[in-house]
Amino acid sequence: MHRVDHLTDTQERFLRCIRRRAADHGEASAVQQIGQAVGMRSRTSVHCRLVELETQSAVARLPGRSRGDPPHKSDPGRYHLLLTVDGRAVQHGWWGREETARDKFRRWIGERGGRPGTRVILLDEETGAVLADWPDRP
């Protein structure tokens, strides 16, 4: 995701709502949830604001999934990859093969690791073990 230099007050409210939901629940907000949080009843209006944020690269839609679907429902997998920035979850991924998950782990570090406060963790959901953690933790 790219840094956005200017957002309107409404766009900022939407972005705060989306980030808060992702940090608190580890999943994206549904259009209806965002509308309730920002005081809008029209789903069409909420959708238009989300498209504006996507156009400005402030948010990204995950292909093949609606915003309200938890990631694990559409892409089940034993290996969970979590990207956080300053302690807030910003991206998740689940894979069934450890080799694929480790490849994604390395790729996420290369693509997103330069941002201060970034942490990438690879977990085995069956055992609860942390398989990899970047940057390394003592």
Image: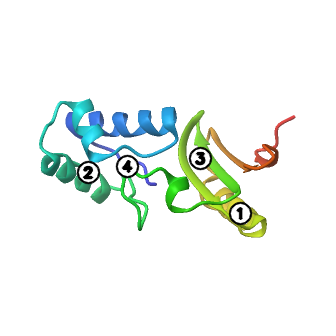
Circle 3 — which element? loop
Q: Which residue is mark 1?
A: 101
Q: Which residue is mark 2?
A: 50
Which residue lies under the disc numbered 3? 115
Element class at badge 2: helix
In front here: 33 or 137?
33
Q: Amino acid at mark 1?
A: Ala
Q: Residue at x 55, y 40 (%)?
A: 89
**Lower sequence index among marks 2 and 1:** 2
- Return the disc, 2 or 4, that comes first in the chain's sequence: 2
Q: Secondary structure at mark 1?
A: helix
x, y percent for residue 118? 63, 43
Q: Residue at x 62, y 38 (%)?
A: 117
Model colouring: rainbow
Q: Is residue 77 left or right of residue 21?
A: right
| Marks 3 and 4, how far apart at CA | 28 Å
- Around disc 3, counting alpha carbons within 10 Å, would you say few (fewer than 14), some (14 to 19), or many (20 or more)? few
Q: Position of residue 34 (x, y in %)?
A: 28, 39
**Displayed quadrant of residue 38:** top left
Q: Which residue is mark 4?
A: 68
Labelled pair 3, 1 in contact (Cβ < 8 Å): no
Dot placed on the residue nearer the N-terminal end, 4 or 1 = 4
Q: Position of residue 48 (x, y in %)?
A: 17, 53
Q: CA distance from mark 3 to mark 1?
A: 21 Å
Q: Quadrant of the C terminus?
A: top right
Q: Give the residue at x 29% y 51%.
A: 53
Return the disc, 3 or 1, that comes first in the chain's sequence: 1
Q: Neighbour class for label 4 at 10 Å: few (<14), some, many (≥20)?
A: few
Compared with residue 11, is residue 2 higher up or lower down, i.e. above or below?
below
Q: Which of pointers 2 and 3 indicates the residue nearer the eye?
A: 2
Tell me which label, 3 or 4, sits earlier in the chain: 4
Rendering quarter of residue 13: top left
